Image (cartoon, helix red, strand yellow):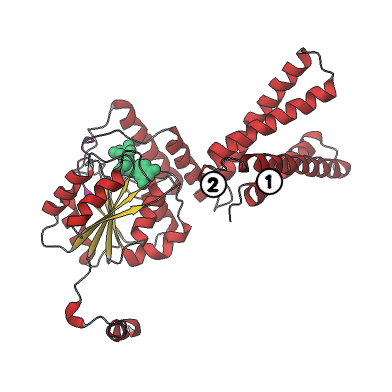
Amino acid sequence: MSQLVSLPSRLTEVGLRPETRTGGPELSVVVPTFREAGNVAALVEKLDAALQGCAWEVVFVDDDSPDGTADVVKEIALSDSRVRCLRRVSRRGLAGACIEGILSSSAPYVAVMDADLQHDETVLPRMLSTLKSGDSDLVVGTRYAHGGSADAFSKTRGAASRLATWLSRTLTGVKLSDPMSGFFMIRREAFDPLAASLFPQGFKILLDIVITAKGTLRIAEEPYVFGARLHGESKLDTRVAMDFLGLLLAKLSGGAVTPRFLSFILVGTLGLGVHLAALDAALTSGLSFTPAYVIGALVAMTSNFLFNNALTYRDKRIKGLGMITGLLGFYLVSAVGLLTGVGTASWLYAYQPVWWLAGFAGAVMGAVWNYSMSTLFVWRVK
Ligand code: GDD
Ligand code: MN
């Protein structure tokens, strides 16, 4: 309250006279975009028609789309101050784009919707009045409740969506009929405290919000009919599906098993196969065992480095000459990791001579070491 009371005087202090002030938006519609140049103008028109009588703005959060989506938005924004563009560079991810878009808003209510017109904008006024009535903090657009539908989906995509819905409802216990929905409206004050705990990767921003809030949000649902995409194509791919499984695991393990760690372990497991294949090739070419083994290890570490750089740490990807120092650092970390693993295993074996237990503990220690050190020193994730 004290903040509100002191606000006018602060505005006068910075030289804004009361009569020159205009009201800010009541609703920010946040739209993540990647290659949506053909859809932006149509969406703005539809929002304009649907939100008559409401002070709204739309924030397109574009991940530097190569088709010039950001330029199209900025062109429209030149003649319409309700339109904003947040252009992010060197980053990808629907969820992260939504988080930053919402954080850029000052409006008390924020909606998230897709740019491709698959979400029905005419539902927005009803969502807004539900929130304004004061009984809910979050309204979720649902395709899986009476009055909603997802018939626009292909057979496989429909089945995948239902499977993901079932998985997340059973594993996390959220009560939503459509936890996979990318269409919702939330009170900004309910969102802001959660922002720092959300995952920026992948698509599942809504599920993440609801899980992270731990039952503190009052949730309402609003059915809508999921339409067909206007232009362009869907960006939901296997990586997005993996991110989704990673999110479920991370949330279920209380943050112990992160998607990044999982990816690191997967790459490492693949590296084991690479090591054996390279060892086999080196032996066949006539080398004796020890040099063949060292070559196998170098090949495996190099391939692990490249895969981790492309997948596990794709948001911190090392490029250009930095690749050389990165690779050398990764060799060093892996070598020390090997020693850590051997040390742990032998120490344990001396006390408890169960070979598989000692071997497993050694492997876990080595993996955790490699992961932590690579994260800190090779890819420098803070
Ligand atoms: N900024 C940004 N960065 N935007 C992205 C990215 C990204 O990496 N990937 C996708 N988007 C944007 C798209 O441009 C689009 O506006 C929106 O996010 C949804 O992406 P689509 O590629 O159209 O997803 P979809 O139609 O397959 O999936 C929709 O339905 C799912 C439920 O079945 C989305 O609404 C999902 O959120 C939803 O879970
Ligand atoms: Mn879509």
Residue 95 lies left or right of residue 133; in this view the side is right
Q: Give the alpha-carbon distance from disc 2 to disc 1, as whole Å.
A: 19 Å
Q: Residue at x 42, y 65 (%)?
A: 193
Q: Is residue 379 inside the magenta stretch?
A: no
x, y percent for residue 134: 24, 68
Q: Is residue 157 above or below residue 349?
A: above
Front residue of 281 and 272? 281
Secondary structure under the numbered disc 1 in the rendered image: helix
For the record, the magenta segment spans 222-229
x, y percent for residue 40: 23, 45
Task: Tell me the quarter of the image containing the N terminus.
Answer: bottom left
Q: Is residue 289 above or below residue 269?
A: above
Q: Quadrant of residue 339?
A: top right
Res. 194 in view: yes
Quadrant position of ligand 1: top left
Q: Is residue 207 above or below residue 54?
A: above
Which circle marks residue 161 in the picture? none
Circle 1 sits on which residue? Answer: 368
Inspect the image, locate mark 1, and give the three-letter code of the amino acid beneath it. Answer: Val
Residue farthest to the front, as pictured? 321
Chain-order first, disc 2 or disc 1: 2
Q: Quadrant of residue 99?
A: bottom left
x, y percent for residue 248: 48, 45
Q: Is residue 228 inside the magenta stretch?
A: yes
Secondary structure under the numbered disc 2 in the rendered image: helix
Front residue of 118 and 318? 318
Comparing labels 2 and 1, the label whose residue is closer to the camera: 2
Q: Residue at x 74, y 42 (%)?
A: 332
Q: Residue at x 29, y 81 (%)?
A: 11
Circle 2 sits on which residue? Answer: 316
Inspect the image, locate mark 2, and give the three-letter code of the amino acid beneath it. Answer: Lys
